[in-house]
Amino acid sequence: MNLILSILTFFTITNATVFKYPESWWAPVNGDNIPEWEVLPQSAVYGKSVVLSKRNELGVFSNLSRAPFIFRGQKYASIEGLWQSMKYPEGPNDPRWNVPGVVWKYTREQVSQLVDFESKAAGDLANENMKKMKINWVTFEGERIVYKGDGAARHYEIIFAASQEKVKQNEKIKKLLKSTGTLVLLPDHKIDSASPPAYRYFDIYMKIRDAL
């Protein structure tokens, strides 16, 4: 009986240690200057779920965060840099280069090195150009992809693989992801349920975590 109690105690202590999470991940945020798009840390339940908030270290899992990685021979400063760069002309023969009335503020290579909201802003500029050109596709290694249409699965495949490399090539990020244990990861911004699967970065990281 004493042996059984000792074993049960051991597993109880071990599990408590493994799944001890920093309370700062759930620290309440209050104030009048909270963006309308933001999902706050206190929206999650301690020990069960956690918001990948930019207000703490978990913000590194945001596509916008600076986390250099190499993907298919190209260096990127962030996942967002990769995502938005696909909207820009690729190679000298890309038809997007010479469309009348369309000006590209950045090159594809420059966008690949952007982070934070600067990378998002570069994508917004590209969206306006895409409207002018009346196109709904982006490119990756010469392949045209309608990522908000029938190319959603292919786009997801690219972003998922790039996110794997981001974790694999950054030991601190890998360690942090492992430390989230069994928590359900939640986005720090509102996401339309109809959005393409690549938008669900929190799901992507849970799948990567499962494979570690």
Image (spheres, rainbow, N blue to C red):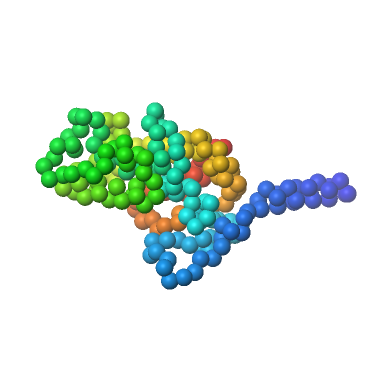
Q: Is residue 90 visible?
A: yes
Q: Nearer the viewer, residue 212 or 35?
A: 35
Figure label count: 0
User: Residue 92, how many percent across, how many down?
Assistant: 21, 29
Residue 42 falls left or right of residue 64: right
User: Residue 52, how many percent across, how many down?
Assistant: 49, 53
Residue 211 falls left or right of residue 119: right
Residue at the left extreme, as displayed: 100
* 27 versus 153 height, above or below: below
* 102 versus 24 height, above or below: above
Residue ID at (46%, 42%): 67
Residue ID at (50%, 35%): 169
Residue ID at (88%, 49%): 2
Residue at the bottom extreme, as displayed: 32
Q: Is residue 153 visible?
A: no
Residue ID at (45%, 38%): 68
User: Residue 61, how many percent across, how many down?
Assistant: 48, 47
